[in-house]
């Protein structure tokens, strides 16, 4: 499968071309003078693609679940969640792990260092734990995450996720691709938890979540402020200006 993104030629809509015939048909939409440059950039993207082996993904998934279990146990000790719920979360994510590994191992994933790629990410949905608790999963130098957004004020554009725990495939920033949705706040928290150094450089913007404030719906950001991981809506004046924004997206949510 050849994946074409907006980063190739911003002038044209992105597409996913599964065959050479699809690619040839799509090229009719591009002026002849720009087709060669377009194809050259596609070729570079293809060279960057790789397949992760099931063994590689198993090691990664086990490490992610171990780290998550350790953090959940700390929340249990702090009486933020019950032990039974912590056990249920890990049990259900382990049950769904083989499916995530199978799907991810069959998907070509482009290796772009600036995109901060994670081939798989386990997610605790906000219908299981609200975002004020999920933020406490994040910790940087002893400073635990805080949510300055009320969970009942968060509106998600993506409303088709009826399950509490699931996996995402091919998660990255700043590459919004055809049919590849941006993340919600709870998904962005999961991505940051398994990729904590990303907050050193970026304020993550979960485009699929907005904050209800009167008649307006400002954007939400997950970032470091005074060393703390913070989730806040975009006009919260306490914070210093944002320099670099990362918009996370995924290729797939494995929810069925």
Image (cartoon, grey):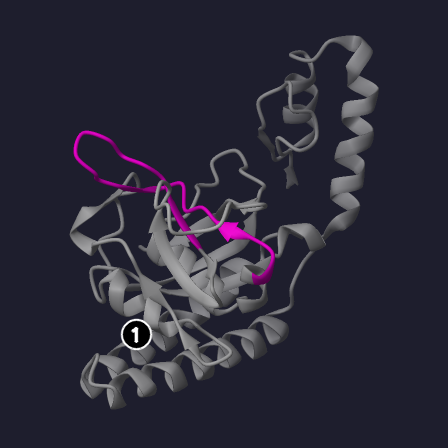
Q: Residue at x 31, y 80 (%)?
A: 91
- Above-or-below relation of 32 to 199: above
Tell me the chief SS of the magenta region. loop
Residues 231 and 37: in front is 231
Residue 99 lies left or right of residue 198; in this view the side is: left
Residue at the bottom extreme?
Answer: 77
The residue lying toward the viewer, choosing from 36 and 196, is: 196
For the magenta stretch, what is the residue range? Answer: 200-222
Depth order, front residue of 110/113: 113
Residue 158 drawn at (x, y percent) = 30, 42
Q: Position of residue 61 (x, y in %)?
A: 50, 74
**What x and y, as percent, mark residue 90?**
33, 79
Where residue 3 appears, as percent x and y from the top left, is 63, 38
Q: Is 202 contained in the magenta span?
A: yes
Under circle 1, the secondary element is helix
Which residue is under mark 1? 92
Q: Is residue 49 left or right of residue 251?
A: right
What crowding class fits label 1: few (fewer than 14 Cα within 10 Å), some (14-19), or many (20 or more)?
Answer: few
Q: The C terminus appears in which quarter of the rendering? A: bottom left
Relative to 220, does residue 53 appear above or below in the rendering? below
Can residue 185 be seen here? Answer: yes
Residue at (55, 76) in percent of width and height: 58
At a point 48% along the width and 50% down the height, the residue shown is 240
Q: Residue at x 54, y 60 (%)?
A: 199
Total tally of numbered discs in the picture: 1
| Residue 69 figure quarter | bottom left
Work out which quarter of the rendered image holds the N terminus and state it.
top right
Residue 126 falls in image quadrant: bottom left
Q: Is residue 105 visible?
A: no
Residue 224 lies within the magenta run: no
């Amino acid at each position: 499968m050849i994946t074409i993104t907006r980063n190739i030629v911003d002038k044209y809509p992105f597409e996913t071309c599964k065959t050479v015939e699809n690619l040839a048909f799509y090229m009719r939409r591009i002026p002849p003078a720009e087709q060669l440059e377009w194809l050259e950039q596609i070729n570079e993207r293809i060279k960057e693609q790789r397949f992760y082996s099931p063994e590689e993904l198993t090691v990664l998934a086990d490490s992610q679940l171990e780290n998550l279990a350790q953090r959940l146990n700390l929340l249990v000790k702090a009486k933020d969640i019950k032990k039974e719920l912590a056990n249920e979360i890990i049990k259900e994510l382990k049950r769904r792990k083989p499916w995530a590994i199978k799907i991810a191992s069959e998907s070509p994933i482009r290796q772009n260092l600036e995109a901060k790629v994670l081939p798989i990410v386990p997610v605790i949905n906000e219908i299981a734990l609200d975002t004020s608790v999920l933020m406490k999963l994040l910790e940087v130098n002893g400073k635990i995450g805080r949510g300055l957004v009320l969970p009942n004020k968060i509106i998600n554009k993506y409303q088709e996720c009826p399950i509490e725990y699931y996996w995402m495939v091919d998660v990255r920033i700043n590459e919004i691709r055809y049919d590849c949705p941006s993340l919600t706040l709870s998904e962005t928290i999961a991505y940051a938890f398994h990729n904590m150094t990303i907050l050193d450089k970026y304020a993550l913007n979960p485009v699929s979540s907005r904050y209800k404030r009167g008649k307006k719906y400002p954007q939400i950001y997950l970032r470091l402020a005074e060393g703390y991981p913070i989730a806040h809506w975009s006009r919260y004046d306490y914070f210093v200006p944002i320099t670099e924004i990362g918009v996370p997206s995924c290729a797939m949510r494995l929810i069925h």
